[in-house]
Image (cartoon, rainbow, N blue to C red):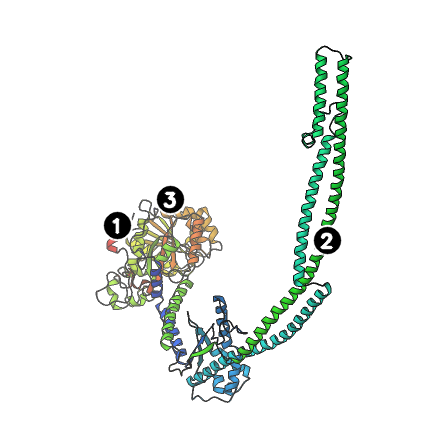
Amino acid sequence: MTAETPQPTAPRPIGPTPDRLEGGGSGNTIIWHTVRKHWATAVATALAITLAVTFYTLGQTKIYQASATIQFDPHPPRPLGAKVETVVDMGSGSYWDNHEYYETQYKIITSTRVTVAVVAQLGLNHDASFLKNAPPGMPVPPNETSEEGAAQALRGRLKVEPIKDSRLAVVKLEDADPDRAQRILAALVDTYITMNLEDARASTTDAGIWLRKQLDSLKNELETSEKDLFAYKEDKNILSLALDDQSNMLREEMKQLNESLTAVRTKREEVAARAAELAKVRADNPSKLPATELLHSAVLQALRHSYEDSVQERDGLLKSGKGKNHPEVLSVQAKLDASREALLAEVRNIQGALDGDLSVIKRQEAGLSGLFEGARKKAFELNRLEIDYNRLRRSKENNEKLYALVLERTKESDLSRMLSVNNVRVLDPPMRPGAPVRPQVPLNIGTGLFVGILLGIAAAMARAVLDRSVKTPDDLERDMGISFLGLLPEIGNLKKDLATPRYARHRRKGVSAAQPGSLELLVHNYPMSGLAEAARTIRTNLLFMAPDHPFRTLLVTSAGPSEGKTTVACCIAIAMAQAGQRVLLIDCDLRKPRLHRVFGIKCSSAGLTTALVKENGDDLSDIIRATEVPNMSIITAGPIPPNPAELFHSERFRAFLEKVQGKFDRVILDSPPIVAVTDAVILSTLVDGTMLVVRAFKTPKDMVRHALRSLADVGANTAGTVLNSVNLNRSEYKYSHYYYYRKDGYYAEEGPTSSGGGSAGGSSHEEASHPPS
């Protein structure tokens, strides 16, 4: 098992760290960078669209536009005065009525009725040039169609545009022949104005005919109602003045009867009240009489005084001590009784008189009630007669009013029909158009250029969006969120270039100029090349990722196949060996091993699988092979086993890994891709750090994310990524800071060099001052 896994603080990598390719991350900068990157696509798209629009515009038929201005008057002249209303309203009053009126007129101008009349007048349905909209002088084969078809073609070329804040409208007609456009538009405007006047006349005539019919009918109804009213008055013997007088007399009579009846009833109540009061007089004490009766009768007053004097005299004798049987007392008592009888008799006489008065009053009340009821019945009968009379009179008056109104309107319609007043007139007649309105060559070409530029930018952006591959270090750090360790330039053509005499200073002594060797050993054979400087930059970044806990064991893997992980592993191992470290490179790709081909070893030779399956695993001398690179040894894969994943899961492999760590300063493992098999994921849990190789302009971002997620799921320590096979001549790197990554290198001779550039973060001299841990 390896030593304790270091926990790096992940500082920003040393050397060529990407501070954004354009120095900013705003939307405009990104768009500008994308367009500059795919400038060929943008320019080609813009040029193609501009040329297409130009050729299309120049190939179009020239269209001319004739126009005429029409004035609408919502208040036409009225020679008969404002009081004489026309039967057909040629205008309108309110704003909304005006708006609807104008809109209606615009539709009438372009209606089928008007256009068919124009087609019939000019014979446009037989005019092949008109039907084909051919320019003057262009030969057109004979052609004809129906009037409706030609009218439909004419409607398609017509347009009515109202002039704002006015009563004017401009009628426009487009045609390829300016003379024909003027001629057709003049005929159309005249036809519309003539039809407008004819429609008003026809409507007035129809209204007049209808009014005369109504006038005859109303005349008959008026005569009938007059006869009915006369017959009713004759039958009921009613005169207009007598009916009103009778009504007033009955009203006055009923008023007087009502007042008399009220007075009699009041008097009856008064007599009845007096009789009731007299009925209360007691025979034992008749002196208590109503005050009203005493005031009205002197006899009654005298009898009452006589009775009261006798009572006082008797009471005086009794008080003087004389008894009831005393002769004087008996004499006074007899006088008292006589006074009482006289007083009671007078009261009875008054009561009889009151009863007689009450009887008379009741007979008067009954007579007055009968007279009042008779007057009321007579009033009701008179009201009924008045209702029937008024009904007949109203019918006659209504018929008179209707007859007078219709008669007046009939006379006005006759006058209106004789007038020729039109509320529409031509303000500006059609003129022959001088210049075509379509196509507008400068505007179309300018619009095409503008749209072409926009679509070119859109095409460039679409190409950038559709291209999901990793291209720059910025893609790794910004989109993937992983540290960038460095990049290796594309070395496909570098091998041929390094074989030329121009790069003699870059070669190691003893290396043939004609045969630079394998690509994986270019860092060793050309230590002063840009590729070697790039490898040393990656080495420096790895060393400074965790200076206190360096990566003793390092796994080099990739997301997918053919991304150059073996080349990167060799370059990193050689760069570390050049720094004086003892480096062991192990080929752990037991699926498709390549390390034996790089160093010219047979595939069937003893290797990693041999050490894992042999009984005595302590002796590794037969599988560890020295290389031409000083301080660097390799272990090839050996015979390919049927179960590579199970071998890496075994304790024997863990023990083997610990054993080789004790013999070397750095152990670098080359493994299969992560997405294809699980070998690399298993190995990532056994090493100090895992370096992910990404092939520029090829590896999709989704695949890189999948690989990083797989490593994170098992808790692997990802040291960072290396961008491999970078074409520094592409637009993404054209203006970047990677000049020294090119094939010329930092030590290139002054003078013209190959295109492209970038800078490596550290050279061999720089790293000499930072010895490895």
For the residues labelled 1 and 2, the Cα–Cα distance comes to: 140 Å
Q: Tell me, yes or no, whether the two marked residues, 3 and 2, touch with CB atoms within 8 Å.
A: no
Image coordinates of residue 757 in percent, x first then y, are 28, 63
> Residue 3: which disc?
3
Is residue 559 among the parts visible in the rendering?
no
Q: Nearer the viewer, residue 586 or 89?
A: 89
Asked which secondary structure carries label 2, the reply is helix
For the residues labelled 3 and 1, the Cα–Cα distance comes to: 23 Å
Q: Quadrant of the N terminus?
A: top left
For the residues labelled 3 and 2, the Cα–Cα distance comes to: 135 Å
> Looking at numbered disc 2 in the image, what kind of residue is underneath it?
Lys
Residue at the disc numbered 2: 377
Q: Earlier in the sequence, mark 1 or mark 2?
A: 2
Asked which secondary structure carries label 1, the reply is loop
Q: Tell me, yes or no, whether the two marked residues, 3 and 1, touch with CB atoms within 8 Å.
A: no
Q: Residues within 10 Å of mark 1 (few under 14, many from 20)?
A: few
